[in-house]
Image (cartoon, grey):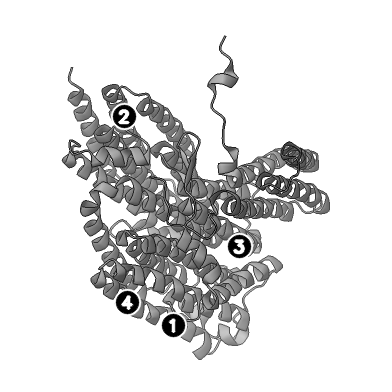
Amino acid sequence: MPIGAYYLVAAVLFATGLVGVLIRRNLIVLFMCVELMLNAVNLTLVAAARMWGGPDGQVFVFFVIVVAAAEVVVGLALIVNIFFRRGTLDVDAQHLLRN
Amino acid sequence: MTDLALTAPPIAWSSVAPELAMTVAVMALLLMTIAGRRRMWVAAPIGVIVTGMGIALLVATGGDGSNTSVAGILTIIGGVGLVSLTIGLAGNPRILHSSIAGLGAGTALLLTGWQVLSVAWNGGGPLLATVAMEGSVALDGISLFTRITVYLSTLLVLPIGHAYLHDRGIHRPEFEPLLLLSATGMALLGAANDLITLFVALEVLSIALYVLTGSARRDRRSQEASAKYFVLGAVASAILLYGFALSYVATGSLELPGIAAGMANPAAPLRLLTVAMVLVVVGIGFKVALVPFQLWTPDVYEGAPTNVTAFMGAATKAAGFAAMLRLFIVAWAPLADLWVPVLAVLAALTMAYGAWAALVQTDVKRLLAYSAVAHAGYATIGLVSRSDAGLSGTLWYLLTYAVSTLAAFAAVIAVERRNARAVVIHDLDGVGKTSPVVAGILSLAMLSLAGIPLTIGFTGKLTVFSAGIGAGLTWLVVVGVVTSVVAAFYYLRLIGAMFLHDPPAGRPAPAYSPGWNVGATSAAVLIVFFGLQPRFLLDLADLATQLVR
């Protein structure tokens, strides 16, 4: 399989995540879309590491995975707290901070 | 069985000595929190161990007065300080935690000074640029100056916010470790010389800041700000990361000088690199709040606890711009024709939008948020100048902005503590009569942010504007000057409210606390001192032009 196919799949994944972030309003779904984008990055990096024949792209992937895990912890904690305070996860329902 | 000593490369600990000091402080604070009432039995041994390490360093170098022995002495000071603080403040855990955090940041600042003098000093020439950790960490002008700005901000924000946190009932033991971790991430961001280090440092600072923003758990505004910051920050990180991945696809290197070499290759895929550049501009633009990626700034600045806002405004901006300088001036240098016009237009938009939007604000924190947006534009002028003067101008500008904005938020904190709600401009009416000190500090900060001569802000604006003119970007400098005049109007509006209006009856006077007095006075003194006498640090910024390439 040509390496370009991997890049293409990754680009489609990334675009899906980005569009999801822009149109969905639920915090958990937004969060899943971000994870999708990060995994698109991982796929790109692994494919590129294979193409260049070096280890650094794959090393980067491990760092991305670890950081994404840390982000999940903090993000879910925030989301749970917000749900307890307000009973909804709709981002449009938050409007205390406005011009 | 391979001999590990033969295969493992030596680790240049000295290149991240300040961050090590911060990490030790974070570990001590976390362990003390876990230990609860027995915190003395945790902190004192850590202090003894640190002292022992310092003595070992001294012995290893033979105490010959060489540069390493200075680091040993600083380590001993840190360790002894930790032990004596633990014993002296055993009865007051809140102040003990803040003091240990301050000790960590102070030691880090001293170690940065040691790094400047021992590693980078070149007898008055440009600071030497070296790499450590297999090329992952750079020790050069950007990293050293960013450290100074970040650690100075940390050191100032800790005492300023102490009583405020106490008043709001949000001073939990995790506050200081998160603040120090965030500062460590910022300092590393300035030193990162490959994309992995850069990304990890960026996330360390961001994740700690998401938590700090939401640290007022019962305040819905804080929660909303935190959620917004988190979602937009995570998306921005993902976009930035995809830009990094694409530049790796195009150039085959994750190290910034390697990326530059890959781009200079005529066979490099230009279209792919353009996409990567756009993604990086978007991602890093979010972090430093360039228009049109500034949407989160006012909301997050308003909702976060005010001392966190102060830290965010002062230090995050410096760190974000440090990463931006390194990314664009080192890695993206071969494609300067592509990114200079883009960033110049963004800078003009940022200055204009920040000035215009701040005019109509009534909430003081929102006003300062829009002013932060405008200042991101001014700092970008130095970056797009692509000259030594521009580089040192931006670094110096970020320091001036950090000090001024800390003083401004310190005044807001003093008013907010008595107010117990968000500060609007009318809350400042007559403050000049009821408490001249707060009014004086806020006025000084406003004059400095507006760039009035004899303040530190003036020297900052002067350096970036002259760098812009030197690089032939006269139109951008004209936009900068015009927006500065507009901005002066809303800065002076705050001063007018304080001194020209009468205080309404029954308005409580702003609150002072010993820590606030120390922090706010130091910030005000720095504004005036470096406004009159900028030479000392400005010379250092002027020397900070040598980069690892």
Query: Which residue is denoted by mark 3 in the rendering?
Result: B156
- Mark 2 or 1, which is nearer the eye? 2
Image disc number at residue B481? 4
Residue B492 position by quadrant: bottom left
CA distance separating discs 3 and 2 = 41 Å
Image disc number at residue B492? 1
The spot of residue A3 in percent (x, y) is 20, 23
Q: Circle 1 — which element? A: helix
One can see residue B149 in this view: yes
> Looking at this view, is B463 or B117 the one in front?
B117
Whether labels 4 and 3 belong to a single chain: the reply is yes
Residue B385 against residue A23 in the figure, above or below:
below
Q: Circle 3 — which element? A: helix
**Which residue is painted at 22% across and 25% down in the image?**
A6
Whether labels 4 and 1 belong to a single chain: the reply is yes
Q: State which tag comes first along the sequence, 3 or 1.
A: 3
> Looking at this view, is B430 or B70 the one in front?
B70
Alpha-carbon neighbours of circle 4 within 10 Å: few (<14), some, or many (≥20)?
some
**Which residue is painted at 37% across and 68% down in the image?**
B464
Specify the amino acid type for callout 4. Answer: Val
- B74 vs B375, left or right, is right
Name the subunit of mark 1.
Answer: B
Specify the amino acid type for callout 1. Answer: Leu
**Which residue is painted at 66% across and 52% down in the image?**
B107
**Which residue is painted at 64% across and 54% down in the image?**
B110
